[in-house]
Image (spheres, rainbow, N blue to C red):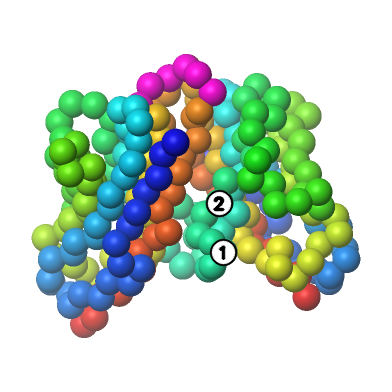
């Protein structure tokens, strides 16, 4: 099976621009997670979905961030407008509740640089 | 609520020396515990995990970890370090059961392992 697929792998943008990060979870996985990784804060959970429904978005830093999961095979994380402090690596991960092992399967990440 | 503390943000060892990366956790329910490794510019890769059963678990690349409930620890070891082990290592905890609403992993801050020739 293919792993979690994220795009783009790298994004460089200017402050104020809209950024959209994309994720395709592993087929059959009904939980999807968005994490952000920075040197200062480490890995932070931003939001997670179950069966396409957001369960906990308490980690979303502010209203500039939004996430959607229109179907079981696709999710987006949008930042509008972007700021330099949003520069980070954003990871998407998934896991299957029916074969629960606690393990998350991660994508390779999207490295965002906001100038 | 769960939390993970990794002692030492940076560990440096010589090639061939013992690797010991420390992890302590806090959990109000039986935990599942994980070690992930991240090589530069890559995603997180599972090294090993403890769910139930044997408390000494073996993972990839010669790493192993022991779950010690009395010490709330899950330290990662490797008898002999190799240059290719240089990476960042993350300890993580999740709830040890399915059901409910909490399937997320909580990560430690990470430990950067440097291996000197």
Q: Residue A17 at x, y = what percent?
A: 87, 63
**Residue B58 is at least partly visible in this image:** no
Secondary structure predominantly adopted by residues drawn in magenta? loop
Q: Name the residue carrying label 2.
A: A44
Query: Looking at this view, is A34 or A10 the one in front?
Result: A34
User: Distance between the Cα atoms at labels 1 and 2?
Assistant: 8 Å
Q: Is residue B115 left or right of residue A74?
A: left
SS state under label 1: strand
Magenta span: B96-101
Q: Residue A5 occupies which quadrant of the picture?
A: top right
SS at badge 2: strand
- Location of residue A55 (image quadrant): top right
Please give the label number shown on residue B117: none
Q: Does label 1 or label 2 sit earlier along the sequence?
A: 1
- Asked if residue B53 can be seen in this view, the reply is yes
Tell me, for residue A38, which label it has, or none. Answer: 1
Q: Mark 1: few, some, or many residues within 10 Å (few <14, many ≥20)?
A: some
Q: Is residue A94 above or below residue A46?
A: above
Quarter of the image with the N terminus of chain B is: top left
Q: Is residue B115 above or below residue B20?
A: below
Q: Are marks 1 and 2 in contact (CB under 8 Å)?
A: yes
Residue shown at 36%/68% (left/top)?
A: B9
Q: Nearer the viewer, residue A43 or B113?
A: A43
Q: Is residue A64 left or right of residue B98?
A: right
- Residue positioned 81% across, 62% down in the render: A82
Question: What residue is drawn where x is 74% and y is 32%?
Answer: A69
């Amino acid at each position: 099976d293919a792993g979690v697929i994220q795009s783009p792998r790298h994004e460089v943008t200017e402050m104020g621009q809209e950024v959209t990060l994309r994720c395709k979870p592993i087929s059959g996985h009904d939980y999807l997670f968005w994490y952000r990784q920075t040197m200062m804060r480490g890995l932070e959970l931003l939001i997670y979905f179950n069966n396409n429904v957001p369960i906990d978005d308490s980690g979303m830093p502010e209203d500039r961030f939004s996430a959607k999961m229109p179907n079981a095979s696709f999710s987006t994380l949008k930042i509008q407008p972007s700021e330099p402090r949003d520069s980070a690596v954003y990871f998407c991960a998934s896991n299957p509740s029916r074969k629960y092992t606690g393990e998350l399967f991660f994508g390779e990440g999207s490295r965002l640089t906001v100038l | 609520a769960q939390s993970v503390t990794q002692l030492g943000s940076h560990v440096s060892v010589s090639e061939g020396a013992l690797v010991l990366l420390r992890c302590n956790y806090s959990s109000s329910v039986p935990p599942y515990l994980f070690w992930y490794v991240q090589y530069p510019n890559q995603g997180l890769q599972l090294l090993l995990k403890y769910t139930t059963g044997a408390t000494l678990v073996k993972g990839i690349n010669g790493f192993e970890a022991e779950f010690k409930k009395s010490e709330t620890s899950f330290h990662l070891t490797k008898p002999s370090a190799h240059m290719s082990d240089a990476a960042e290592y993350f300890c993580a905890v999740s709830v040890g059961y399915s059901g409910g609403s909490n399937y997320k992993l909580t990560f430690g801050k990470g430990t950067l392992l440097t291996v000197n020739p």
